[in-house]
């Protein structure tokens, strides 16, 4: 049985269509992350599942019940908000108990459940405080506690970590993951941060301009992006994309980028002269010679050391290229880099017109 | 947030009940105006008989004809315009520079002057000393006296001062670097940046002037100087004290009541005309100075 | 640039304060403020043994108390209700209408009240007539004065007064409501558990301001509505001052009554401000 199903879901604000026919099946206990740039419709989609926004077209099912016209309170979902939405006038205990009080649960039950949940989240010492007296991470936990006490069918997270500093974000991210492993409740999580998406998700849904670009596990999206958008969104730094033209020769398929030629993997659906985009991840680029590959000359303009790695900003015939290189504790040798090698089997080729990937590998998976 | 289709049944009932209550209160607010308008267009006889409820009975414009031929009505109407326009200009001439000066951190004795002005909001001498003072100043029965003596109030100065204070210091510093003096900074930088606040204060002044009646009644004796509100008050007094008017006019097309109603209508119309403009600003204005500071 | 305003304040507000000394003098127009002979607290002694003044003082308190009891909650309730109205056009229209009476002068308000409650013409008696009740001379009955006065105040000011509370409501973080919706709260529950607690600071500040203004009843409207027959319930300190001073010419005596009123008002305002400072850390001014 699936947990949440979206069929042909659309959202209009007047004439403006912000979500264009979303189809998505979320399995029981699955952790699905909706990711995309701001304005891509991910939050609107989440709010339609919550019942905070009406669904203009299509249907949303939660555990085999169409909920289009069901009030939020009858959907049995719980939500964690970006700014936590803690009631400033209530203490932590009452904030967590809010949903249970509203539902007029028996007092002893509320007491017991809230205590249990605070224990899980390490909030027990803070139950008598007000939200203003808590740190960012503690507020975040209270917001999660409030969702957990209700034992909902689905957890909805709306960019819950975006108000935290980088260090705390990493820590809370792991906590959310642990919590999900422990409770096993279906979760839908919205973020614009691809790192969060990669680390948390069972499956990632990449959205752009109100449509789904690709759905898949984090590694599927990383290894086999379906199009240039996903390739450019997942991974940090994102995949390099070089404009080129297909040339065929005895030695195989090549793409000409300016006056440089890059060897491509075998493709059966291209012809000479076709405009393509060559995708190569910064971490896949090699600086030592690879058998059978001719070097690609680059002009280096900047080296950013990150510690064990460094980012090399360069150009190939005027097109930007980023290379991630190991430093081995030293960056002086990186300043001398003048040519690189692009391993053929790791290259993605995209149709310049449609942006779709041309490698067959994507279709296999 | 308010998604009707996603409301539960109970919420829908609640929303409907509330909307109905709001509707009732709104109608109750509006009704007296409609009623007065209806009375003003009814015959004196119908009004006397208590027949007017919602629409004019025995439709007539006699009451209006009775007023509109009275020179006192037109004189008082004209005077009200003089007091409103003259008074508002006078107010702005005092308030804007004072508020600007008080908003400058470099003003010497700023704390003292602020207190000096604010103190008048908490304590005032009262009717009698104010009246005697006006007499000593020879401003009894003087149109200029009315315009001058009510030009300033502490609340408006403080309201505008607060707004000026919220304008970043860098605006003034930039203007000074460019060589502007105090007046130029005020006139070329602060006034254009404070249009909403100044508009709000202008409106407060206009409304207060248009509606002001008590001191005009006390201080002005000459018929040719009284504003509309005082003229209306005289008519009202005739109505409640002098039953003769009503009796002699019983059979007539107008009565004291319909005449009063007609004057009320005439006096409200200008307010209604500027009301959309007023409404645009007063919500801001209330919040600008009101409770927060 | 400050000077014109300062001079104005001195001439029109501070000089009358100097003139207040006539409350302790036997004031004569011909001698003027400075040269009239001192009489000490004689006027105050007369004042506190004057039944009319004592009555006016208690009337002020009673009318203010009624205003507080009925007039204070009205705009809050109205704002809470406006917050529940879904149709934006309906809401805007209703707001436009209920704000309107605030901008109408007290003379016109009085005119409307007098006309509406008039025994022959008035709509109120017309309706009572339908119910078979004989006309009541409302404005000559002391027992009716306060209900009419307080009711008129609500009619005129409740709508406008709701603006402050609506602004406070608008300042509540919307995700608090969204979170409550997902948690299953009804609109009614949200009103009590979110809206009211959130605007409580505003409510308390407004209440403190009201308490500070207890001595300030809108005496302009009272002057227009009361008559000797209703002095018993309608006469307040300011109307008493007006009659004694400006109508009967007992300037010194009336100034004493006014001074007493001003001092009581000043003390109340100061207490209110201290309270508010303690409560909200920001004082009212």
Image (cartoon, coloured by chain):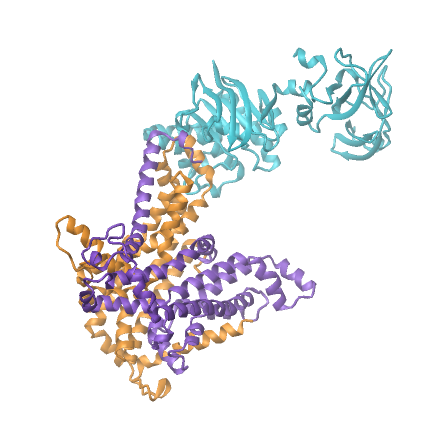
The image quadrant of residue A70 is top left
Question: Along the line of sight, which residue is nearer the eye, A73 or B71?
Answer: B71
Quadrant hosting residue C181: top left
Figure quadrant of the N terminus of chain B? top left
Count of numbered badges drawn on the protein? 0
The image shows residue B182 at horizontal and vertical percentages of: 62, 68
Is C170 placed above or below A363 here? below
* Chain C colour in the picture: orange
Q: Residue A122, can we see it? A: no
Q: Where is residue B156 in the image (x, y as percent from the top left)?
A: 46, 64
Q: Residue at point 39% right, 78% down?
A: B134
Q: Does residue A270 sit above or below A323 in this rendering?
A: above
Q: Position of residue B35 (x, y in %)?
A: 28, 53
**The quadrant where residue C256 appears:** bottom left
- From the top left corner, tell me how far across and down residue C258 is, in percent: 31, 73
Residue depicted at 33% across the width and 81% down the height: C22
Residue A309 visible, this angle: yes
Q: Is residue B246 left or right of residue A277?
A: left
- Seen in the picture, residue C25 relative to A94 is either above or below; the reply is below
Which color has been applied to chain A in this rendered view?
cyan
Question: Is residue B29 left or right of A208 when viewed as pictured?
Answer: left
Residue at 52 percent of width and 59 percent of height: B163
Please name the color used to draw chain B.
Answer: purple
- Horizontally, is B253 left or right of B171 in the view? left
């Amino acid at each position: 049985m699936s947990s949440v199903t979206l069929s042909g879901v659309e959202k209009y604000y007047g004439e403006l269509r912000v979500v264009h026919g979303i189809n998505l099946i979320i399995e029981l206990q699955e952790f699905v992350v909706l990711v995309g740039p701001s304005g891509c419709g991910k939050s609107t989609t989440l709010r339609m599942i919550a019942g905070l926004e009406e669904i203009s077209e299509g249907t949303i099912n939660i555990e085999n019940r169409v909920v289009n016209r069901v009030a939020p309170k009858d959907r049995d979902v719980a939500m964690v908000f970006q700014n936590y939405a803690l009631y400033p006038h209530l203490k932590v205990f009452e904030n967590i108990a809010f949903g249970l009080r509203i539902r007029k649960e028996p007092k002893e039950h509320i007491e017991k459940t809230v205590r249990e949940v605070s224990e899980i989240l390490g909030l027990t010492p803070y139950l008598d405080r007000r939200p203003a007296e808590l740190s960012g991470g503690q507020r975040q936990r209270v917001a999660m506690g409030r969702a957990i006490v209700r034992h909902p069918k689905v957890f909805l997270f709306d960019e819950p970590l975006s108000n935290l500093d980088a260090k705390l974000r990493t820590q809370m991210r792991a906590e959310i993951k642990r919590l999900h492993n422990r409770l096993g409740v279906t979760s839908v999580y919205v973020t614009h941060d691809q790192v969060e998406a990669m680390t948390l998700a069972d499956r990632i849904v990449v959205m752009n301009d109100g449509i789904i670009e690709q759905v898949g596990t984090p590694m599927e999206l990383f290894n086999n992006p379906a199009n240039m958008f996903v390739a450019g969104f997942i991974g940090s730094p994102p995949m390099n994309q070089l404009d080129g033209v297909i040339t065929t020769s005895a030695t195989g398929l090549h793409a000409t980028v300016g006056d440089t030629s890059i060897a491509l993997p075998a493709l059966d659906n291209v012809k000479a002269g076709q405009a393509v985009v060559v995708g190569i991840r910064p971490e896949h680029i090699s600086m030592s010679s690879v058998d059978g590959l001719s070097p690609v000359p680059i002009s280096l303009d900047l080296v950013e050391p990150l510690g064990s790695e460094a980012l090399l900003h360069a150009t190939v015939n005027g097109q930007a290229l980023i290379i991630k290189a190991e430093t081995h504790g030293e960056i002086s040798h990186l300043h001398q880099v003048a040519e690189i090698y692009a391993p053929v089997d790791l290259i993605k080729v995209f149709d310049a017109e449609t942006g779709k990937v041309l490698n067959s590998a994507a279709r296999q998976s | 947030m308010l998604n009707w289709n996603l409301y539960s049944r109970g919420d829908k009932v609640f929303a409907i009940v509330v909307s109905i209550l709001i509707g009732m209160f709104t109608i109750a607010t509006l009704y007296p105006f409609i009623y007065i308008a209806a009375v003003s267009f009814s015959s004196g006889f119908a009004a006397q008989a208590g027949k007017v409820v919602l629409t004019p009975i025995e439709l007539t414009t006699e009451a209006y004809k009775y007023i509109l031929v009275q020179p006192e009505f037109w004189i008082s109407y004209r005077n009200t315009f003089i007091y409103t326009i003259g008074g508002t200009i006078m107010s702005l001439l005092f308030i804007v520079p004072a508020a600007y000066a008080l908003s400058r951190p470099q003003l010497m004795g700023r704390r003292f002057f602020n207190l000096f002005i604010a103190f008048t909001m908490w304590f005032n001498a009262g009717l009698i000393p104010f009246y005697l003072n006006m007499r000593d100043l020879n401003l009894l029965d003087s149109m200029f006296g009315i315009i001058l003596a009510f030009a300033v109030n502490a609340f408006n100065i403080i309201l505008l001062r607060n707004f000026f204070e919220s304008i970043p210091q860098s605006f003034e510093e930039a203007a000074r670097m460019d060589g502007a003096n105090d007046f130029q900074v005020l006139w070329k930088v602060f006034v254009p940046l404070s249009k909403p606040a100044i508009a709000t204060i202008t409106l407060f002044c206009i409304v207060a002037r248009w509606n002001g009646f008590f001191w005009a009644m006390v201080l002005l004796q000459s018929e040719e100087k009284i504003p509309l509100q005082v003229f209306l008050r005289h008519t009202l007094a005739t109505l409640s004290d002098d039953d003769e008017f009503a009796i002699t006019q019983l059979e007539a097309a107008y009565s004291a009541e319909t005449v009063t109603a007609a004057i009320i209508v005439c006096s409200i119309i200008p307010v209604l005309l500027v009301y959309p403009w007023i409404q645009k600003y007063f919500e801001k204005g209330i919040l600008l100075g009101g409770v927060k500071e | 640039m400050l000077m014109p305003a300062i001079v104005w304040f001195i001439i029109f507000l501070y000089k009358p304060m100097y003139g207040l000394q006539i409350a302790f003098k036997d004031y004569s127009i011909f001698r003027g403020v400075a040269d009239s002979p001192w009489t000490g607290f004689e006027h105050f002694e007369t004042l506190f043994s004057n039944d009319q003044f004592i009555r006016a003082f208690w009337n002020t308190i009673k009318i203010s108390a009624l205003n507080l009891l009925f007039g204070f909650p009205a705009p809050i309730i109205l704002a809470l209700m406006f917050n529940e109205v879904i149709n934006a056009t309906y809401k805007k229209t209703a707001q436009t209408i209920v704000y309107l009476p605030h901008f109408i002068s007290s003379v016109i308000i009085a005119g409307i009240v007098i006309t509406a409650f008039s025994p022959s013409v008035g709509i109120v008696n017309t309706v009572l007539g339908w119910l078979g009740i004989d006309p009541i001379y409302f404005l000559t009955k002391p027992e009716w004065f306060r209900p009419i006065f307080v009711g008129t105040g609500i009619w005129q000011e409740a709508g406008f007064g709701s603006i402050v509370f609506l602004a406070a409501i608008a300042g509540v973080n919307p995700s608090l409501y969204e979170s409550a919706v997902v948690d299953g709260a009804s609109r009614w529950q949200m009103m009590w558990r979110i809206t009211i607690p959130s605007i409580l600071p505003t409510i308390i500040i407004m209440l403190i301001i009201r308490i500070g203004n207890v001595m300030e009843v809108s005496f302009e409207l009272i002057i227009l509505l009361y008559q000797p027959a209703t002095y018993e319930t309608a006469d307040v300190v300011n109307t008493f001052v007006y009659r004694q001073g400006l109508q009967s010419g007992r300037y010194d005596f009336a100034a004493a009554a006014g001074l007493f009123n001003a001092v009581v008002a000043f003390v109340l305002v100061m207490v209110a401000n201290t309270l508010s400072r303690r409560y909200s850390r920001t004082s009212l001014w």
